[in-house]
Amino acid sequence: MVRHHQPRKGSVAFSPRKRVAKETPRIKSWPQSDEPKLLGLAGYKVGMTHTLVTDTDKNSPTSGMDVFTPVTVLEVPPVVVMGIRAYEKTSRGMKVITEVLADNLDKELSRKISLPKEYDQSEAIAKIKGVLDNTADIKVLVHTNPKVTSVPKKKPDIFECGIGGATPEDKLNTALELLGNEVSASEIFNEGEYVDAIATTKGKGFQGVVKRWGIRIQYGKAARSSKARHVGSIGPWTPRRTMWTVAQAGQMGYHKRTEFNKRILKIASKDEVDQINPDGGFVKYGLVKNDYVLVKGSLPGPSKRLVILRQPIRPNNKAEDVPQINYVSTKSKQGV
């Protein structure tokens, strides 16, 4: 008998496929950069549209031609640096030594965390400078400002962000300059630059093996063919257990995912919102009211979902010019 083999259905690299604990993604790895600035930015996914962009890739068949390109719109109001954290390297990984908070914290943060009633910032700064010899890394705490967007919430999202600098001392000096201040997208990224997008994907609930893993539907004369959307075999007699690699039904979606090297086509200020808002606003979002970013292609998650853009951790080193956008569709997306 001839045995036919084929690749397994679905990747086991993302197992276990369960719901994330927090919708705001936690980024564990940041690229090394000597440039004194934040290495990440958070925005809210608005929706998608299409643009007409001049292709600048010399090796492309459409080089020099105008091509229609799908883009994702992110509303990115300025983020606020609310704190600084010092990390030391231990045998069990990086641990927080101490932290500094800003004086002028937004009152809306009380919806998210407990704000200190009496806080001596100068004492905290002196303490973090005192442990600088034992410090291996400096990171900052950043919060968003969703109340100025069309996202129907006031509670800010807080995430930890890496900061550029050759040494922990350089990073601390940069962090102290930014502490309590707003940072806009144009201060972090440039048009034409590649970034990584981290977000929580759309939740699809409890799904079967065909949709969740992509296995083939059983043909008509197969055993137990009355149930076509199931796995033909869940394993051998030995070992006498079902392996974790076997495709089974369960949670699909609402997972943390990272997409590498997404290109920024445009960074626009809030004065240019008329160039992007369609008639009637974006479906399930509304109107863009603040700075926004156009990212080539799609991004994880539904509209209103928080998306964190990070400096590329595995850059493709592809030198391209600043994108030339000749047209942005503002046609109404209602009923599409």
Image (cartoon, helix red, strand yellow):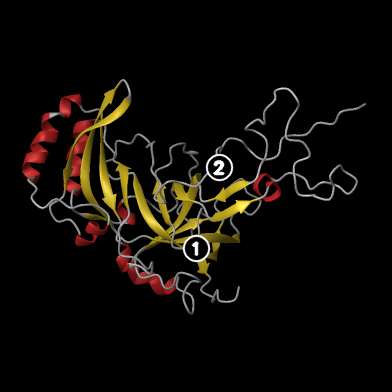
Visible in this render: residue 297?
Answer: no
Screen quadrant of the N terminus: top right
Instruction: Tell which circle, 1 or 2, labels the residue nearer the N-terminal end.
Output: 2
Q: Do the residues bearing badges 1 and 2 touch, measured as CB atoms within 8 Å?
A: no
**Residue at far right of view:** 1
What kind of element bears circle 2? loop
Residue at (80% x, 50% y) in the render: 227
Residue 16, placed above or below residue 185: above
Residue 54, placed above or below residue 208: below
> Foreground residue, 158 or 276?
158
The spot of residue 50 in percent (x, y) is: 55, 65
Residue at (46% x, 48% y) in the render: 197
> Foreground residue, 279 or 101?
101
Q: Residues within 10 Å of mark 2 (few under 14, many from 20)?
A: some
Screen quadrant of the C terminus: bottom right
Residue 85 is drawn in which quadrant? top left
Residue 189, placed above or below residue 324: above
Residue behind mark 2: 17
Residue 108: which disc?
none
> Foreground residue, 190 or 102?
102
Residue 325: which disc?
1
The spot of residue 323 in percent (x, y) is: 48, 56
Q: Is residue 279 left or right of residue 127?
A: right
Residue at (14% x, 56% y) in the render: 104
Q: Residues within 10 Å of mark 1 (few under 14, many from 20)?
A: some
Badge 1 amino acid: Ile
Q: Is residue 152 left or right of residue 174?
A: right
Q: Is residue 163 left or right of residue 190?
A: left
**Residue at far front of view:** 240
Badge 2 amino acid: Arg
Visible in this render: residue 314?
Answer: yes
What kind of element bears circle 1? strand
